[in-house]
Amino acid sequence: MAKAGFDRVAAALGLVLLAPALALIALAIVLEDGFPVLFRQTRVGRGGRPFRLVKFRSMRVGVAGTRITAGRDPRVTRVGRWLRRRKVDELPQLWNVLTGDLSLVGPRPEIPPFVDTEDPVWRAVLEVRPGITDLASLQFRREEEMLAGAADAERYYRETILPPKLALNLEYIRSRTFWGDLKLIARTLRAM
C-alpha cells in the first residue's frame, strides 16, 4: 500500500511539474507527423490482466511493421528517434501509474504474444505490478541497436533478450526495497 501511495503521489507531481515539457513534446509530434500524439498498446499487467499502456507516439501513423522495433526502423519519426533515445516517450506512463496499472519501478510489461502464463517464471513476474523502469530497462537500454543486426528481430528478442530480462525481473522481485526503488529511479533519470 505504501509503495502504491508513493507511486501515485510521485506520478501526479511528475505530471504537474512536467506539463510544460509534455505540451512541447506533443506539439513537436503534431508538427512533424500530425495526430494522434499518444500511442496506446495492450500490455500484460499484474495477475496477467491486460491494460492499455500510454506512450508518446514515435512512429508514423498507418505504417505496418513488426511488433518489435529495431534500430534504424523507417517507421520511427525524427522526433520519435529523439524521444526513444532519451526514453522520454515513456513519460505519459505516469498516467498509467495514477490509474494503478503501473508502478514507478517494477518489471516492464510485455505485449501478450511474448507472455507465457504457463511458465513459472512468467507467473512469478506477473505477481507484482509492472513498472515504468526496472533493472532490465537499464541493462538493455540499447536493445533497439541489438535488434537491428538480427535477421528475425522477434525471434532474437524472444530467445536472446527476453530470458535475461526475466532473470533480472526475478532478481528485482526477490530483493526489492523502497530504497532500492529510489536508486533505480535515480539511475533511470541519469540515463535519460
Image (spheres, rainbow, N blue to C red):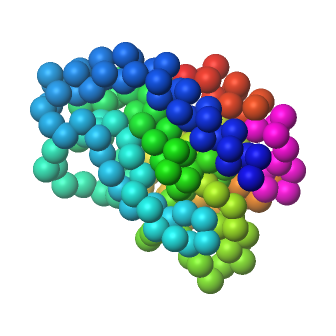
Residue drawn 46% across the image and 68% down it: 50
Above or below residue 68? Residue 8 is above
* Quadrant position of residue 129: bottom right
- Residue found 23% across the figure and 27% down from its top: 29
Residue 70 is situated, as x and y percent measured from the top left of the image, at 39, 44
What x and y, as percent, mark residue 49? 52, 71
| Majority secondary structure of magenta residues | helix
Instruction: Judge from the rendering whether residue 62 lies leftward or rightward of residue 170; answer left or right.
Output: left
Q: Is residue 173 visible?
A: yes
Residue 81 against residue 24 in the figure, above or below: below
Magenta stretch holds residue 179: yes
On the rendered structure, is 147 left or right of 10? left
Judge whether 24 appears above or below 8 on screen.
above
Residue numbers of the magenta segment: 172-181
- The front one of 168 and 15 is 15
- Which residue is more in the foreground, 133 or 54? 54
Residue at 55% x, 63% y is: 45
Counting from the top left corner in percent of width and height, residue 143 is at 52, 42
The residue positioned farthest toward the bottom in the image shown? 118
Where, quadrant-wise, is the C terminus in this rendering? top right
Left or right of 122 in this view: 17? left
Q: Assess whether residue 15 is covered by the magenta stretch.
A: no
Residue 78, position in %: x, y?
26, 25
Viewer-proximal residue, 18 or 146?
A: 18
192 left or right of 187?
left
Residue 140 seen in this snapshot: no
| Number of numbered callouts drawn | 0
Q: Residue drawn at (44%, 62%), measured in percent from left and top?
A: 51
